[in-house]
Image (cartoon, rainbow, N blue to C red):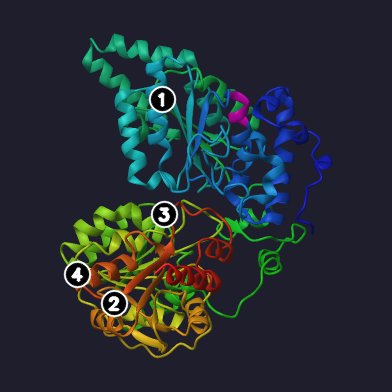
Amino acid sequence: MTNSTINLNHYPLLKQINSPTDLRQYPAAKLPEICAELRQFLLDCVSRSSGHLASGLGVIELTTALHYVYNTPFDQIIWDVGHQAYPHKILTGRRDEMLTIRQKEGLHPFPHRRESEYDVLTTGHSSTSISAALGIAIAEQQKRSDRKVAAVIGDGALTAGMAFEAMNHAGHVKPDMLVIVNDNDMSISSNTGALNQHLAQILSSRTYTSLRESGKQFLSTIPPLKNFIKKTEEHLKGLVTPAILFEELGFNYIGPIDGHDIDNLVVTLQKVRQLKGPQLLHVITKKGKGYAPAEENPTLWHGVPKFDLQLKDDATVLATSSTVKSEPTYSQIFGDWLCEMAENDKRLVAITPAMGEGSGMHQFSKTYPDRFFDVAIAEQHAVTLATGFAVSGFKPIVAIYSTFLQRAYDQLIHDIAIQNLPVLFAVDRAGIVGADGETHQGAFDLTFLRCIPNLVIMAPSDENECRQMLYTGYLHDGPAVVRYPRGNGVGVPLMALEPITIGQSKIVRQGEEIALLNFGTLLPEVLQAAKELNATVIDMRFIKPLDEQRLLQLSQTHRTLVTIEENSVKGGAGSAVNEFLLAKRAKCDILNIGLPDIFIPHGSQSEIRDDVGLSAEKIVAQISRFLMNS
């Protein structure tokens, strides 16, 4: 398969659509054909370029209907998280660039404000869309601009408290806005048939809403009758829809409707667009729609490497699309360790905010279902849930990505650290994650963690050390963090579990004049650089507490100390070394090497590491320049 271009002659309708304005020139009768071409084009693109697939396939009709009905970009659509926004990108002028998505200097993996005027919000984390849409709705209403705003949020993202906080506020201030709940966790069941389609048409009609509001005003003077009618309306809606919750939050609930029926979607959206106040449209879709392997296993097909579109078997398709490595990933190392520990300790419980598969917890969840807690996209709740387990004498482990731990910072401080509770945080995807880009890079965890009292923070240099550190943190009588990267280990043998002395570094190479202080899995690059510089290499292992005795010794025996980490250089492990040696008035030069003071863009891990100066060659170059200027 070639990666260069896609033959647009296979897509005669889509070929003519360079913007939503072009889409709106077609009669509604042509929309099913356009959707069919869009679905096949998305499959063609992702099979060649890699990326998010199942979510995009599920919103083909919804995306098309929204851009057909709403006057984008004047009207604004916000895609929550954004991994489902590939069809949106295709219809908004980026069709011919889709093969560059997630690649260095190519299209962003998620909506991005600097990429297109159609991308209202730069997204990547979940559950932000309703809050942003509410802000826009209030602002545009005050400006009297008549601009419409719609937020598209999945049922998974709706589990986060932030989404309900926003809905509660919207129901209070009541601006004109639409929230579309894209419900893909269930199939189109019998109660979402003709009756519900008809009901949705009634609930979205101006006649109904007008009668509803005028009736409320009239009945407000007769409280007993008003309450009776209100309860009757709620009961009738509740028979066929989950309306009551959203109605109580102040939204007019419409649906559920079939998210793959483009004709009904268009008609419903045309009516909803004219309504006043906060509206909620419940749309039922199927992840992976139109591609059998993705329909059958949407989790596997959420984010995929390049694959052969002609094959139909999941395992065969994905096996032919990526290089198989013998070394386990750090996530797999964690998952195996988790099972090993759980076998011998019934107090162990594992918690994750919807990252069970990505964090390597699949086997644990099958073997120990009563001790596995996937709390959905609710990072704050995940951390404080661990508090409750710890208070009750259990041994909770929170598996969470670095970028998502940011969302539970107060809980980590207030509920865990202040009380010095024995909770282990397995922080996956620390450092550069690659193609997911700015919103997902694990660039800041060392910076925001090391200022918190009572935390022990560790960074392994290989997969065996990762196991030993997890074990050490698990045994520690207080909160502990082990941060490790995305990707495969280096192939070292795995040893029997032995706790590491907390705060103890180790000498890896003895040299002269220069000492390289390694924090994390950049050790192979650091060793390669050290050979060229004849430098000492210390695997620091602990960011907190630091091996202060070793640092003092090195400052007396070496002219220059160089800290190297895959974290923001501002406030990271190197800053901790600076602070300590400055306080001790150490007489040596110090250079900090890490991630620069920018948001790291997308690209492969190796490309980005080289760009930011973390390859062996770039490490040597930075040290050489520093020495020349000393």
Q: Is residue 66 found inside the magenta-colored segment of the image? A: yes
The amino acid type of the residue labelled 4 equals Ala
Circle nearer the N terminus (2, 3): 2
- State which quadrant residue 303 falls in: bottom right
Residue lying farthest to the left in this orientation: 419
- Taking the spot 34% from the left edge, 23% from the top edge, the residue there is 174
Which residue position holds label 4?
583
Circle nearer the N terminus (3, 4): 4
Label 2: element kind: helix
The amino acid type of the residue labelled 3 equals Asp
User: How far apart are the alpha carbons under marks 2 and 3?
Assistant: 33 Å
Q: Provide residue 295's location: percent of width, then percent of height.
A: 62, 53
Mark 3 neighbour density, 10 Å: few (under 14) some (14–19) many (20 or more): few
- Above or below, 218 against 610 in this view is above
Residue toward you, 447 or 270: 447
Q: Quadrant of the N terminus?
A: bottom right
